[in-house]
Amino acid sequence: SFPLAEGYATLEPGAVSVPMRATCCTLQPGERLRLSLALACFPSFPVNPGTGRPPWEAGIFDHQVVTVRLRRDKSILHVPLRAAEEQA
């Protein structure tokens, strides 16, 4: 697998929307998309120190353990689709 789009957000607890970079792909019947969430993607994105401060202001010893809880029953992934005849 390989990434089609990436997004980055510094978040507070609660419901959030993560903006994604635009992408376009054609899936053949039986192919699937996978959503992968990661707390870091260094060096593509700066490491979140977990302090609320911007990464460029945090020292190496300022970094904290970050915990993420996902509520699968409340999660939604919106994927806009175009019909095959619209792609011509």
Image: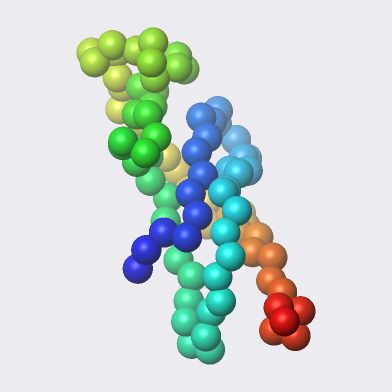
Whether residue 73 can be seen here: no
Residue 14 in the figure: left or right of residue 5: right
Question: In the visual, does 46 lie left or right of 61?
Answer: right
Residue located 71% across and 78% down the image: 87
Q: Residue furthest bottom?
A: 29
What residue is drawn where x is 35% and y is 22%?
49
Q: Could you tell whether 20 is left or right of 56 in the image?
A: right
Looking at the rendering, in which quadrant would you find the N terminus?
A: bottom left
The vertical placement of 5 against 13, above or below, is below
- Name which residue lies at 41% across and 59% down: 3
Furthest-front residue in this view: 88
Q: Position of residue 70 (x, y in %)?
A: 48, 48
Quick one: 57 or 64, which is closer to the camera?
A: 57
> From this viewpoint, is residue 31 visible?
yes
Locate the C terminus and report the quarter of the image it occupies: bottom right
Residue 38 against residue 66 in the figure, above or below:
below
Residue 56: image quadrant is top left
Can you give x and y, in whole percent of width and height, for residue 71 in the image? 52, 51
